[in-house]
Image (cartoon, rainbow, N blue to C red):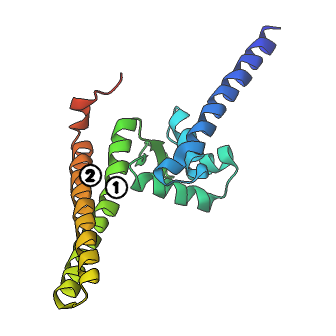
Amino acid sequence: MPGKEQSKDWETYEEIIDHFIQAIAKNMNLYGLTSSIGRLYGVLYFSDEPMTLDQMRDALEMSKTSMSTGVRTLMDMKMAESTFKKGIRKDLYQSEEDWYKSFTSLFGNRWRHYTETNIEEAEEAIHELTKISASASDETLKQKIENDISRLHYAKNYYTWLMKFIHTIESGKIFELIPKED
């Protein structure tokens, strides 16, 4: 009978890990990732050894193309990396174990792009509205433009502050303010 109890323990263990992987997958949209990429990350994270695309495909019952695309996405986001093991010719992949590092890289890359774009758009709108105001004779329009330029300066100041926040995260200074949990 001990074999049956051990088998039940393994089954319970696998259910618990699978449940956590599903939770990771469900919340990957916070990072702009699909749940299938989240499941892939979870499988890599809980794997004791680096995995090949074939092993990932078997574990997730997805196409090799989907696995390849998912791994590439995870690598671009610094959530997975390729590795080498002597005697194995196929590409091997493993998850990035440092979630803090993954978050800071992912957050910085995503937010920096959008924030820089918004700063540029605010500057462009201010420039264009200033030109219209300079040549407009309608005082109501000039007042509306002045009010909107004030709003745009406020928005630009916010995005400038956000860039400082992003730098605080990317540089790791965030961990001086909010220490990592061990």
Q: Dots 2 and 1: beta carbons under 8 Å?
A: yes
Residue closest to the far right: 1
Residue at x-position 41% and y-position 45%: 84
Mark 2 = which residue? Answer: 162
Q: CA distance from mark 2 to mark 1?
A: 9 Å
Residue at x-position 76% and y-position 19%: 7
Q: Nearer the viewer, residue 31 or 130?
A: 130
Q: Secondary structure at mark 2?
A: helix
Tag of residue 111 = 1
Amino acid carrying label 2: it is Leu
- Residue 83 locus on image (x, y percent): 41, 46
Residue closest to the far top: 1
Quadrant of the snapshot with the C terminus: top left
Question: In this rendering, would 67 be left or right of 31?
Answer: right
Q: How many numbered dots are placed on residues in this image?
A: 2
Res. 87 visible in picture: no
Q: Nearer the viewer, residue 162 or 60?
A: 162
Residue at x-position 66% and y-position 43%: 59
Residue at x-position 65% and y-position 33%: 18
- Considering only order in the chain, which callout, 1 or 2, is on the residue closer to the N terminus? 1
In the displayed structure, would residue 65 be above or below residue 170? below
Q: Residues within 10 Å of mark 1 (few under 14, many from 20)?
A: some
